[in-house]
Amino acid sequence: MILNKITTEKGEYVVLRSLEKNDIKRAKEFAAYLNSLIKEKDFICFKKPVTTQWEKNALRDWLKNQRKRTMIPIIAEYNGKIIGIADVRKRMGVMDHITVMGISVRKGYRNMGIGSALIEECIKTARQKKAKILRLEVFSTNKRAITFYKKYGFKKVAEIPHQIQRRGKLISEFVMLKYL
């Protein structure tokens, strides 16, 4: 289902959509997207490339959680190519007022307004889910992302030291919140 159509700052059209059952057949493309991020070795938690089979299983889990409304994946496509993915996950029980989000944009498509469109869709989705707090985690060294999140009203509320192994060093992870 199409959630939004945007025009990038360069005048290109990008579709934001929900995950679809047919996406399982595109697991190789989704794996290539994720592997392109992993290859950068900067701001993603994976160390090794994922296989198409791993991605198929992940997509099946995403679809199951989407049906249960506990996770809402958002796919950004340009001319049918996956160029961004975000997700909003609802916490459970005594934390059901919190949603957690993640966001990524493929190299070569950054600084075009795609991240902004994805984060705005995440905020909208969190509000639709009646969340009071939107939460994310970010590498402390990812200054660009931190600045971006602050632009959307996220505030750093915690630093977890030595949480992430990056390029042979242990770095902190920041927890950032946006009150809705």
Image: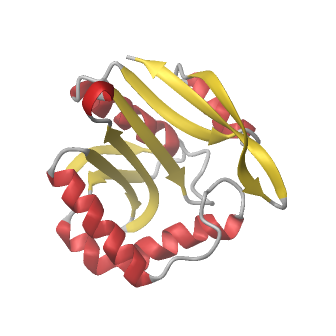
Instruction: Determine whether, in the image, residue 38 is placed left or right of residue 152.
Output: right
Q: Quadrant of residue 155?
A: top right
Instruction: Determine whether, in the image, residue 107 is placed left or right of residue 167.
Output: left
The residue lying at 47 percent from left, 45 percent from top is 102
As displayed, is residue 134 above or below residue 35?
A: above
Which residue is most to the left?
67
**Total label count?**
0
Q: Position of residue 169 (x, y in %)?
A: 84, 54
Q: Quadrant of residue 166?
A: bottom right
Instruction: Determine whether, in the image, residue 27 is placed left or right of residue 65.
Output: right
Q: Position of residue 170 (x, y in %)?
A: 80, 50
The residue lying at 28 percent from left, 33 percent from top is 125
Which residue is most to the right?
168
Quadrant in which the C terminus appears: top left
Q: Position of residue 142 (x, y in %)?
A: 72, 42
The residue lying at 56 percent from left, 38 percent from top is 137
The residue lying at 27 percent from left, 71 percent from top is 23
Instruction: Determine whether, in the image, residue 62 is placed left or right of residue 158.
Output: left
Q: Is residue 1 visible?
A: no
Which residue is most to the front?
94
As displayed, is residue 18 above or below residue 31?
A: above
Q: Position of residue 143 (x, y in %)?
A: 74, 37
| Camera-nearest residue between 90 and 33 | 90
Q: How is the image coloured?
A: secondary structure
Q: Is residue 67 visible?
A: yes
